[in-house]
Amino acid sequence: MGVMADWLEADLEALADSREFGRWMAAEQKRIFLLCRRMLQDFEDADSATQDTFLKAWQALKRPESKELEDPAKWLTRIAVNTCLDRLRSRRWQFWRKRPNQEDETTILEMAPTSDPDAEDRLFAKQIVERLERALDRLTIRQRAVFTLRHYEDRSLAEIGGILDLEVGTVKAHLFRAVAKLREELHDLYFREGRK
Amino acid sequence: MRHWTELDFQHWLYGLKDEDSHLAQCAECRGELERLKGQRRRVVAEPEVSQDFLAAQRRSIYGRLEAPRHHWHTWRWVLSAAMLLILAVGVTMQLRHKPAPAISDEQLFSDLSAIEQSAEPRAIQPMHSLFEQ
């Protein structure tokens, strides 16, 4: 967080320095990777999208006409989300795509929260997270982006609007439809009988 | 006093509903809200990502940063221009190609009339020579 705070005050010149960029990248990398992973639901695609995001950021920072950044983290999030949206759009034509095998990811990504000491809760969390992730396929691309930013990143509707370049009312409409489509999964997530 | 419904709670969690006077007065609904917030925190908690993986990803990004940029955008335009050129050449050649001499209407009607009046198909005529002495 300290590194992040530094960057909020950093100017473009510093960001465009390769060593400083490396520090910034290391601080933001996990967040961006998880965001891409959640939006794309595909580990390899998320890896590639994360790399593209930092590459685009670097190239943008190197451009002489670049303007000063008010909030580099938000700017980077916007690049990541747009990269993911492009990939999701091009995926529509890739009818041969299969859903990735979750088992391949287990050595790299521990999906269940590690801080939870209760084994049953861990299993439940893992199952519901996976179910919810699968259910995201039912959403449109915009609904998925809005829901991901709200559910996983806990961003305000205004922030989401800023990232996606949408009016707050439009964000609200997308989110409303997303929640309606995911009603069953969200019910199990929050209200399943017998949960503590 | 109407308690908040499941949908009310869901909408509040996703920023679609504001807190109202009922929530301020009802300890039961406030308690449920806290439970839901805790539940969400537990389920949405960031998973651990392997440090080895992140390091490998950084190396890959550095590699791409240092690699000479491929001018895909330029190549895309060059390829498009080449395709257009090929198409234009093809169309031009097609237009220049002289079509077979058009048969006049009189000739056509004459041929059709001959076919109609013939007792046997024209294709059989060469076979007659086989039986001629």
Image (cartoon, coloured by chain):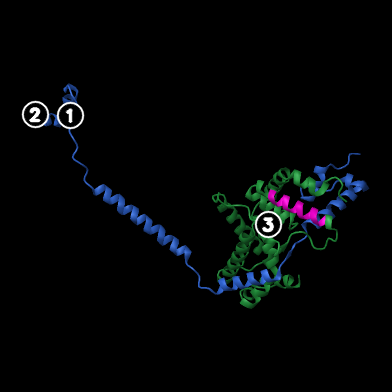
Q: Nearer the viewer, residue B21 or B72?
A: B72
Q: Is residue B44 above or below residue B116?
A: below
Around disc 3, counting alpha carbons within 10 Å, would you say few (fewer than 14), some (14 to 19), or many (20 or more)? few
Q: Residue at x 87, y 47 (%)?
A: A194
Q: Nearer the viewer, residue A151 or A101?
A: A101
Around disc 1, counting alpha carbons within 10 Å, would you say few (fewer than 14), some (14 to 19), or many (20 or more)? few
Q: For numbered disc 3, what is the local secondary structure?
A: helix
Q: Nearer the viewer, mark 2 or mark 1?
A: 2
Quadrant of residue A84 in the image? bottom right
What residue range appears in magenta?
Answer: A121-134
Q: Which residue is mark 1?
A: B124
Determine the CA span between mark 2 and mark 3. Answer: 85 Å
Quadrant location of the C terminus of chain B? top left
Q: Which residue is mark 2?
A: B132
**Residue A193 visible in image:** yes
Q: Are marks 3 and 1 on the same chain?
A: no
Q: Is residue B109 above or below residue B75?
A: above
Looking at the picture, which amino acid does disc 1 mark? Ile
Q: Position of residue A132 (x, y in %)?
A: 72, 50
Q: Which mark is residue A57?
A: none
Is residue A131 part of the magenta span, yes or no? yes
Q: Chain of mark 3?
A: A
Quadrant location of the N terminus of chain B? top right
Give the color of chain A as drawn: green
Q: Nearer the viewer, residue A114 or A102?
A: A102
Determine the CA span between mark 2 and mark 1. Answer: 14 Å
Q: Chain of mark 2?
A: B
Q: Residue at x 83, y 54 (%)?
A: B39
Q: Which residue is mark 3?
A: A102
Determine the CA span between mark 3 and mark 1. Answer: 73 Å
Q: Nearer the viewer, residue A91 or A141?
A: A91
Q: Position of residue B9 (x, y in %)?
A: 82, 46
